[in-house]
Structure formats: C-alpha cells, structure tokens
Amino acid sequence: MEKYQPDEHDKTAYLLQSAHVDEGDYFSSRVHKDMDGILEDLRKLHIGRSDGAPKSTVAEELKRDLEEVVNFEGSYTEQLLLVFCKQTKLRYNKLSEEEKQWLIRIMQKSELIKSVVSKRGKGKK
C-alpha cells in the first residue's frame, strides 16, 4: 500500500483495508470460540450434580423468604421467628406452640430484638 500510494478514493485500497483482520483479534476470537465450546460441554456434564452451582442464590432465597414473611399474619416477633425458621430450614408449621414460645423467649434475649422495640412517644433525656 505504501509503495503504490493510492488516493483516498481508490476502491481497491478501500476493499483491502476493509477485509484486513488484525492478527490479535483473529486469535482472540478463535480462542474465545474454543473456550465457549469447552464450557458448554462442562456444563452439560455437570448438570444435576450436588457439588455444582446452586439453582438460586442466597440473596434470591432471602428475598423470597422476606416476601413470604411480609404476608404472614402475626406479631413482629412471630415474623422474626418465621425468618429464623426459613433461614435454618426449620418448618414453622411443624413446630408445636410450646416450641414456638420457647424460641420466642430465646429470641427476646437478643440485643437486636431489644433495640427494635418502639420508642415512639418517649422524649430524649
């Protein structure tokens, strides 16, 4: 190209420049395609394995649990108990009333529960 010095409107030079593929881009594309194929094969081989990635993330599970708790009719403490049961995979419905009361009593000893108590109407000292 430098030897012949075509003008800027030379169609042949334009066609050659358009068809030119950078060597780095070419090999990067080839390696990427090969890796995509390998990863797809690995995915197919590991579908359903217990040591594979979980179907849903912890954040998604927590979001579902919290949405369910919002619709739960009960006191604030009972809602917290339901969250606790969801996160620890305890079946809330399988707990007896006595077990629920024991868990609530234990939860009430937590500093987090104590700090949530409404202080509305109490002036600053």
Image: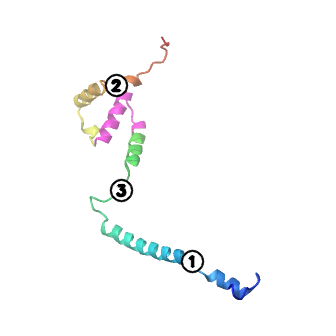
Bin the neighbour count of mark 2 within 10 Å (Cα to Cα): few under 14, some 14-19, many 20 and up. few
Q: Is residue 17 visible?
A: yes
What's the amino acid at mark 2?
Answer: Glu
**How much space separates mark 3 and mark 2, taking CA atoms?**
34 Å
Is there any visible trace of residue 75 in the rendered image? no
Residue 13 shown left or right of residue 23 in the figure: right
Is 25 situated above or below 124?
below
Compute the Cα span from label 2 to label 1: 64 Å
Q: CA distance from mark 1 to mark 3?
A: 40 Å
Q: Amino acid at mark 1?
A: Asp
Q: Which mark is residue 22?
A: 1
| x and y percentages locating residue 84 in the rendered image | 32, 36
Give the amino acid at mark 3. Answer: Lys
Name the side, left or right, on which 123 lies relative to 90. right
The quadrant in which residue 111 appears is: top left
Q: Is residue 77 above or below residue 67?
A: above
Magenta part, dominant SS: helix
Closer to the eye: label 3 or 2: 2
Give whichever of discs 3 and 2 has the lower sequence position. 3
Q: Would residue 124 appear left or right of 90 to someone viewing this image?
A: right
**Residue appearing at x 39%, y 37% in the figure:** 69
Per the rendered image, the range of residues in magenta is: 69-88
Q: Between tags 2 and 1, which lies in front?
A: 1
Task: Provide the residue designation for mark 2.
Answer: 111
Percent coordinates x, y for residue 53 in the rendering? 33, 58
Total tally of numbered discs in the picture = 3
Q: Quadrant of residue 6?
A: bottom right
